[in-house]
Amino acid sequence: SESDTEHPLLTAIARSKELLQESKFERLCQVELISKDPILSKELLSGLELTAKAGLNAAATQNNQPAITEWRRKLQAIAEAKKFQSTSVQTKLLLSNLFVRL
């Protein structure tokens, strides 16, 4: 039944939060695995975008300027990755570039 499995986007958001807490090296070690699954890659980018928007909103509510700047930078990197995802750019290259910038 549907209650037995989490919605893929909820899983992607949880994974996004983990990725954002990891070091660049730890994120880059996962590019190979994630890039092999185009659905996972797409869901992960959506999860990262939602997580970053929530982080930006929280920072704005607290008027935390350094955090606002950081979340905007991350959102820009995610938006660029999503734009390139719709072209023929290799997923592995796209994720590597994004994970370095997060």
Image (cartoon, helix red, strand yellow):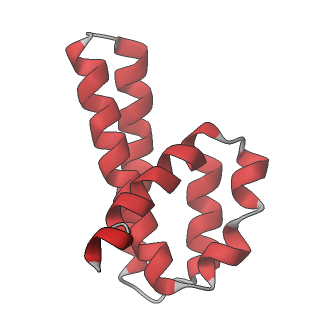
Is any part of residue 25 visible from this angle? Answer: yes
Q: Is residue 16 above or below residue 56?
A: below
- Quadrant housing residue 57: top left
Visible residue check, residue 102: no
Identify the residue at horizontal 29%, vertical 80% (top origin): 1
Q: Is residue 4 left or right of residue 36?
A: left
- What residue sits 28% from the left and 41% below the top? 53
Left or right, 29 with reference to 86: right
The location of residue 15, given as percent across then percent down, is: 52, 55
> Residue 60's x, y, as percent?
24, 19
Residue drawn where x is 43% and y is 15% of the image: 66
Task: Give whichever of 75, 22 is nearer the camera.
Answer: 22
Residue extending farthest to the top is 63
Query: Relative to 51, is 68 above or below?
Result: above
The quadrant in which the C terminus is found is top right
Residue 31 found in image quarter: bottom right
Percent x, y of residue 51: 36, 45
Q: Is 54 located above or below residue 66 in the figure?
A: below
Query: How many labels sit on residues?
Result: 0
Identify the residue at image location x=61%, y=54%: 99
**x and y percent of residue 30 in the render?**
71, 65
In the picture as drawn, the residue positioned furthest to the bottom comes out as: 88
